Amino acid sequence: MKQIYSNKIINEIRRPRNVGKIKNPDGVGMVGNPLCGDIMKIYIKVGKESSGKSYIKDVKFQTLGCGAAIATSSIITSLAKGRTLDYVLTIDGNTIIEALGGLPREKIHCSVLADRALKKAIQNYRKGIL
């Protein structure tokens, strides 16, 4: 029987990292897909490097959805944590898919959702909406 998900995806589903909510976040991004029912919410806490660049000091997620939605949420938070906002804004769906060792075609939308949620959190932070 052919395995649908890579071992990396299975590990992210079984032991997702950075799950939860940040109290008093600097930014929050929430997205959903009405067709599949996935909902992702990403919280960020932003710090400043000595050079003055902003970076993701902490990041957490809450996701209601399939295993791929959980895996993509987990991996994007791991890719973003400790990185500058400029770098994080270069992360896209393809970066997420690569980091997971691939995604089935019908689950690629999960990588897009995770990307959009994180970018919305950064946009929220930059606009000072909270």
Image: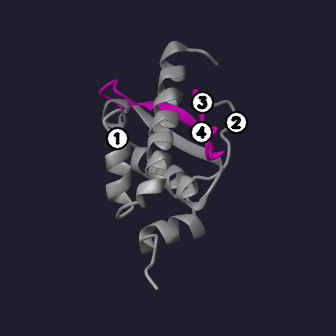
**Camera sees residue 105:** yes
- Residue underneath mark 2: 23
Residue drawn at x 36%, y 62% is 102
Element marked by disc 3: strand
Query: Which quadrant of the figure has residue 44?
Result: top right
**In the image, is residue 28 part of the stretch drawn in magenta?**
yes
Q: CA distance from mark 2 to mark 4?
A: 26 Å
Label of residue 10 in the image: none
The colour mode here is one colour
Q: Is residue 86 left or right of residue 10?
A: left
Q: Tell me which segment is drawn in magenta.
A: 26-54
Residue type at mark 1 is: Ile
Residue drawn at x 43%, y 69% is 8
First in sequence: mark 1 or mark 2?
2
- Residue underneath mark 1: 91
- Residue underneath mark 3: 28
Element marked by disc 4: loop
